Image: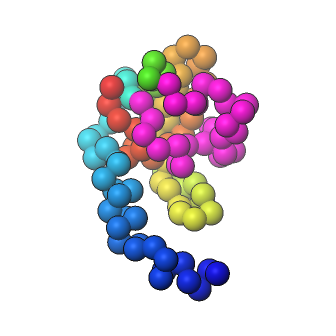
């Protein structure tokens, strides 16, 4: 089955779609952001998110995060892709911090 994947999907189309859903704008400390793509987001120790345990990370139009560190250089291996986690964000209600790729968050 794996040998037929390139035939079943247009890889360029998928890459273009993924890139179209990234926010190219620079994020600064203190910016309020919302998450566009959770695939690069982890806990501070690198542990992947758990959709049941991490309720605050569910898609919710009211939830936002604050950028507290930029210029980080962590690499998250998400099995199918490696992401540079260059931001640390915090939920202002719970004070829980997360690492994420800056293209995966959008300025609020």
Q: Is residue 70 left or right of residue 78?
A: left
- Where residue 65 appears, x then y in whole percent? 46, 25
Check the image and name the residue furthest to the right: 53
Q: Position of residue 11 (x, y in %)?
A: 41, 73
Q: Nearer the viewer, residue 59 or 86?
A: 59
Q: Is residue 82 visible?
A: yes
Instruction: From the image, give the main secondary structure of the stretch colored magenta.
Output: loop
At 53% from the left and 22% from the top, the residue drawn is: 91
Q: Is residue 89 left or right of residue 23?
A: right
Q: Residue at x 30, y 53 (%)?
A: 20
Figure quadrant of the C terminus: top left
| Residue 66 located within the stretch drawn in magenta | no
Residue bounds of the magenta highlight? 34-60
Q: Toward which corner of the image does residue 55 lie, by quadrant?
A: top right
Residue placed farthest to the front in the image?
8
| Residue sitting farthest toward the top | 93
- Residue at point 62%, 80% (across, down): 2
Quadrant assignment for the N terminus: bottom right
Q: Position of residue 86 (x, y in %)?
A: 45, 46
Q: Is residue 72 visible?
A: no
3 lies above or below 98 = below
């Amino acid at each position: 089955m794996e040998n037929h994947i390139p035939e079943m999907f247009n890889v360029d189309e998928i890459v273009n779609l993924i890139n179209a859903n990234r926010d190219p704008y620079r994020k600064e400390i203190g910016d309020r952001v919302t998450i566009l793509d959770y695939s690069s987001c982890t806990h501070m120790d690198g542990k992947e998110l758990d959709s049941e345990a991490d309720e605050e990370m569910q898609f919710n139009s009211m939830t936002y995060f604050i950028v507290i560190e930029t210029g980080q250089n962590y690499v998250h291996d998400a099995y199918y892709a490696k992401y540079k986690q260059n931001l640390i964000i915090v939920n202002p209600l719970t004070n829980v911090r997360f690492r994420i790729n800056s293209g995966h968050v959008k300025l609020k």
